[in-house]
């Protein structure tokens, strides 16, 4: 395993869109701490501007990060509100990155927020933090293992 800054592991996507055909994802659509949608958002179309995301990008809610609003979508859409949208770099695997942002190490630095009423994660602080990551092959295996766990938990609920 090697130490890498978050900016070496993921790129932050900043492409805006006000598409009226792509589904929109807001904080209220995500089950906190579970990373799944709580409703069908395919019919939730409007023309508000947000950050365009692709399948296997990661949505991370930077506003009140202790609410643990994250999503690993298998569709293209637009993130509305205070989301960071991450895409894997050539040293990482999207499924591993998704579980990395749920780790205690990531959550600790993401919750070192600025602001009191509306605390937000500080990109400068989070992006320069080192995280331990394994080889890409091991990342794939770890990502697949945790996905299988998540799927099993969802089935039992």
Image (tube, rainbow, N blue to C red):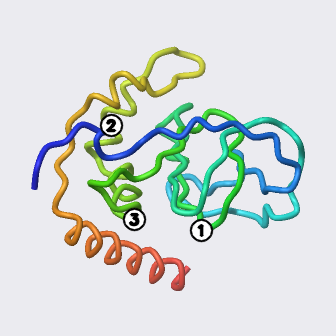
Residue 137 falls in image quadrant:
bottom left
- 7 lies left or right of 59: left
Where is residue 113 shown, x and y percent of the image? 42, 22
Identify the mark at residue 42; answer none if there is no mark. none
**Residue at point 32%, 54% (across, down):** 90
**Residue at point 31%, 36% (across, down):** 108
Q: Name the outermost residue toward the top.
A: 115
Above or below, 46 against 22 in this view is: above
First in sequence: mark 2 vs mark 3:
2
Which structural element holds mark 1?
Answer: loop
Q: Name the outermost residue toward the front.
A: 90
Where is residue 124 shown, x and y percent of the image? 37, 22
Identify the mark at residue 95; answer none if there is no mark. 3
Residue 91 falls in image quadrant:
bottom left
Identify the mark at residue 7; answer none if there is no mark. 2
At label 3, counting other C-alpha atoms closer than 10 Å, the crowd grade (few under 14, some 14-19, many 20 or more) is: many
Question: What residue is disc 1 on?
Answer: 74
């Amino acid at each position: 395993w090697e130490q890498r800054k978050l900016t070496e592991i993921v790129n932050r996507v900043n492409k805006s869109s006000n598409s009226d055909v792509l589904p929109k994802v807001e904080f209220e659509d995500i089950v906190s701490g579970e990373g799944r949608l709580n409703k069908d958002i395919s019919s939730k179309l409007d023309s508000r501007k947000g950050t365009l995301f692709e399948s296997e990008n990661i949505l991370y809610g930077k506003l009140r990060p202790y609410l643990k609003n994250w999503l690993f979508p298998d569709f293209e859409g637009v993130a509305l509100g205070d989301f960071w949208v991450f895409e894997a770099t050539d040293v990482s695997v999207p499924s591993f990155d998704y579980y990395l942002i749920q780790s205690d190490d990531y959550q600790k630095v993401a919750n070192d927020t600025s602001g009191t009423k509306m605390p937000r994660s500080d990109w400068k602080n989070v992006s320069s933090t080192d995280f331990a990551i394994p080889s890409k092959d091991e990342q794939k295996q770890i990502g697949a293992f945790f996905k299988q766990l998540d799927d099993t938990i969802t089935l039992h609920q």
